[in-house]
Amino acid sequence: MSDAKVERVYCPVCLAKFKYSEGWSEGSVVVCPICGERLTLRKTADGWIGDRVDRGTEKEIRSRIDGFAEIRGYVFNDVKEDIVEGLLGKYKRFGDFYCPCRMEHVPEYQCPCKPTRGGDVEKNGKCHCGLFWKKA
Ligand SMILES: [Zn+2]
């Protein structure tokens, strides 16, 4: 039996889909390869969706940024704690983990922001905030 249709999982953080891997099933906790978010898989009529694990907590944003740095091979410096605090403040005031260094609270500036996911760190050595750094 071969099914040519590639199954994908929708990530509600980066609003993109990534490839479903064999061995996953409903309830599996996986890491979004695009943004680093931990997601619990759920099957819907429209396909696979990932539900954010520990949504809105410090644990969620820490595991997301740590996961993203690990995937990309980025490092942090001592401003990390200030930025985590800023991200928590954004969640409290604006309902999600938007970039603490920008005024716009739109999905593309959800941390790690779209420019960062798109390769800003490779280009500039760091992200807009100075949270993620290219390894020296
Ligand atoms: Zn994602």
Image (cartoon, grey):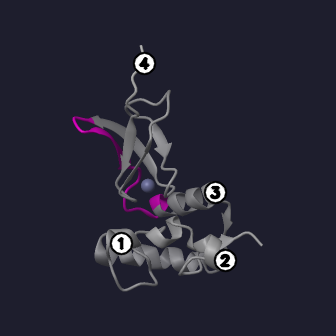
Instruction: Name the residue type under label 4.
Output: Ser
Mark 2 residue type: Gly
Kindly indicate whether the residue at mark 4 contacts the one at mark 1 (C-beta within 8 angstroms): no
Sequence-first tag of 2 and 1:
1
Foreground: 52 or 20? 20
Which residue corresponds to mark 1?
Answer: 91
Q: Which residue is mark 4?
A: 2
Tell me the magenta residue range: 44-60
Q: Tag 3 or tag 1, which sits nearer the N-term? A: 3
Quadrant assignment for the N terminus: top left
Mark 4 surroundings within 10 Å by alpha-carbon count, few (fewer than 14), some (14 through 19), many (20 or more): few
Measure the alpha-carbon separation of dots 2 and 4.
Answer: 44 Å
Q: Is residue 135 left or right of residue 65?
A: right
Image coordinates of residue 16 in percent, x first then y, are 38, 54
Element on which disc 1 rests: helix
Q: Which residue is under mark 3?
A: 70
Location of the C terminus by quadrant is bottom right
Nearer the viewer's eye, disc 1 or disc 4?
4
Q: Is residue 96 visible?
A: no
What residue is pinned by disc 2?
125
Identify the residue shown where x is 64% and y is 57%.
Answer: 70
In the image, residue 4 lies at what x, y percent? 40, 27
Which circle, 4 or 3, is nearer the viewer?
Answer: 4
Would you place residue 62 above or below residue 80 in this image?
above
Q: Is residue 40 magenta?
A: no
Task: Name the element at disc 2.
Answer: loop
